[in-house]
């Protein structure tokens, strides 16, 4: 159910906010697999767990629902899940904040971090400031009827824990219209929502096996060594394919769905820094004590350029 906007637009450009440290973190985040951190910091299957993982990697305490901007109350962090469609990259609508919070403040300065919808690997980022024509176009949502027209910013009420939870959302079309989504990015794969819904057994995501060009019948599970069967033609074409783990299989693998990802389609190429860590993280080979925080490996500059 869609409701009218509660907060009127500010009617002025937001002041530009920068942070050199945040910019460095964003640059180093490409190729970061969010799955292992999500298991550490958020309940299994919870909404927003990958956003919480991103906050944790950036050195923040995972949180949601605050009226402050995530980064020093200067810049908001937003994780956008993307996938490869026929005409470029696509995304879903995105929650901005709860209805009680001013969405115009939340969108004043934003770091948009893009992650592949299937693998949950960071593939790129953009910084934006709510100003000029972008601001004016978004502010037009204030005068648009949410029931009969298609505003870029709208309020929608979702069922959450047996209660209505109204919140502000940005439409998927807004990201395309404002040119925030590149036409393509390395590491972005097609997404099959029907297969994914059926494959998430017990609220647990399917397990990944990387395919490096092995012949049919030679792909092995990296966790237990059992045989993995997948459509290699589809792997070569789309970069991924549903898979079946044949017997014998280990304890972790038996009750989970599986899919294979072509190693040639990852966000980081062979030999790039972080590639080995990405492969281990994707395939579930890291113990909880081996998940390292991105912020611990990025040098904080003396001057943040505030």
Image (spheres, grey):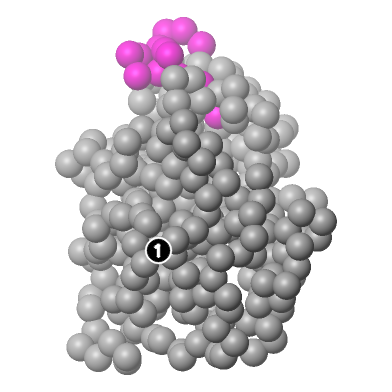
Query: At 20% from the left edge and 88% from the top edge, which residue is drawn?
Result: 302
Secondary structure mainly formed by the magenta segment: loop
Which image quarter is the C terminus in? Answer: bottom left
Q: Is residue 41 left or right of residue 125?
A: left
Residues 280 and 175: in front is 175
As drawn, 88 above or below 48: below
Q: Residues within 10 Å of mark 1 (few under 14, many from 20)?
A: many
- Mark 1 lies on a secondary structure that is loop
Q: Is residue 157 above or below residue 229?
A: below
Which residue does the image show at 37% across and 71% down from the upper left?
A: 69
In this view, the residue in front, 110 or 257, is 110
Residue 154 position, x and y percent, is 64, 60
Residue occupying the point 44% across, 20% down = 202
Give the magenta-colored segment's residue range.
Answer: 246-259
Q: Which quadrant of the rendered structure holds the N terminus? A: top right
- Visible in this render: residue 85? yes
* Residue 86 versus residue 203 in the image, above or below: below
Which residue appears farthest toward the top when viewing the image? Answer: 247
Q: Which residue is mark 1?
A: 29
Q: Is residue 216 above or below residue 64?
A: above
Magenta stretch contains residue 270: no
């Amino acid at each position: 159910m869609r409701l009218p906007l509660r907060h009127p637009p500010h009617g002025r450009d937001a002041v530009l906010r920068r942070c050199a440290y945040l910019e460095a973190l964003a640059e180093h985040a490409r190729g970061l697999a969010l799955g292992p951190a999500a298991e550490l910091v958020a309940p299994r299957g919870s909404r927003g767990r990958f956003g919480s993982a991103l906050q944790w990697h950036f050195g923040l305490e995972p949180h949601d629902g605050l009226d402050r901007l995530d980064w020093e109350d200067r810049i908001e962090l937003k994780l956008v899940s993307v996938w490869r469609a026929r005409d470029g990259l696509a995304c879903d609508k995105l929650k901005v904040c709860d209805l009680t919070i001013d969405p115009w403040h939340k969108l004043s300065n934003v770091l948009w971090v893009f992650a592949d919808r299937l693998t949950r690997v960071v593939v790129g980022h953009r910084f934006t400031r709510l100003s000029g024509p972008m601001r004016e176009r978004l502010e037009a949502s204030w005068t648009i009827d949410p029931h009969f027209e298609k505003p870029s910013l709208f309020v929608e009420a979702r069922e959450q824990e047996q209660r209505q939870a109204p919140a502000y959302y940005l439409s998927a079309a807004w990201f395309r219209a404002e040119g925030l989504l590149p036409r393509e990015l390395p590491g972005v794969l097609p997404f099959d929502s029907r297969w994914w819904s059926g494959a998430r057994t017990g609220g647990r995501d399917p397990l990944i096996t990387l395919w490096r060009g092995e012949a049919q019948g030679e792909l092995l599970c990296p966790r237990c060594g059992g045989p993995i069967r997948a459509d290699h033609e589809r792997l070569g074409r789309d970069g991924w394919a549903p898979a079946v783990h044949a017997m014998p299989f280990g304890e972790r693998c038996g009750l989970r769905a599986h899919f294979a990802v072509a190693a040639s389609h990852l966000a980081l190429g062979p030999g790039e820094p972080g590639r080995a860590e990405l492969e281990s993280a994707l395939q579930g080979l890291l113990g909880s004590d081996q998940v390292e925080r991105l912020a611990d490996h990025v040098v904080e500059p003396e001057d943040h350029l505030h």
